[in-house]
Image (tube, grey):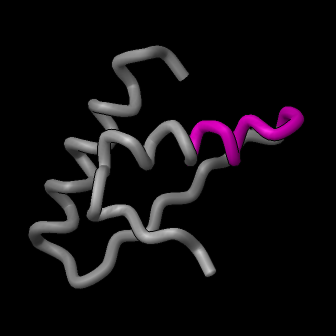
Amino acid sequence: MNAAAPAELAEQINWLAAIAAWVDVLMNNNWEDQGQRNAKTLMDPLGGSAILPG
């Protein structure tokens, strides 16, 4: 994931969240732990709107 990608994705996710009751984001990376790392990187620009899975 390049440096601009998390902010761009967060903008789109927040836009969807404004018009939807719930937005799920899946990270489909099958190389080592990249899916988890990319998801964690995406949580920073989402700020308080990110909910940890649980």
**What residue do we see at 57% from left, 58% from top?**
26
Q: To which quarter of the image does residue 6 belong?
A: top left
At which x and y percent is residue 25? 47, 60
Q: Is residue 36 above or below residue 7?
A: below
On whether residue 34 falls in the magenta region, the answer is yes
**What residue do we see at 43% from left, 70% from top?**
51
At which x and y percent is residue 2? 48, 15
At which x and y percent is residue 22? 31, 79
Q: To which quarter of the image does residue 35 belong?
A: top right
Is 27 left, or right, of 10 in this rendering?
Answer: right
Q: Residue furthest right?
A: 32
Quarter of the C terminus within the rendering: bottom right
Q: Is residue 27 above or below residue 53?
A: above
Q: Is residue 41 above or below residue 3?
A: below
Q: To which quarter of the image does residue 48 belong?
A: bottom left
Q: Count the marks: how many?
A: 0
**What residue do we see at 81% from left, 40% from top?**
33
**What residue do we see at 42% from left, 16% from top?**
3
Is 10 left, or right, of 37 in this rendering?
Answer: left
Is 19 left, or right, of 29 in this rendering?
Answer: left
At which x and y percent is residue 40? 56, 45
Quarter of the N terminus within the rendering: top right
Q: Which residues are magenta?
A: 31-39
> Predominant secondary structure in magenta?
helix
Q: Is residue 26 above or below residue 31?
A: below
On whether residue 32 falls in the magenta region, the answer is yes
Residue placed most toward the observer, 6 or 48 = 48
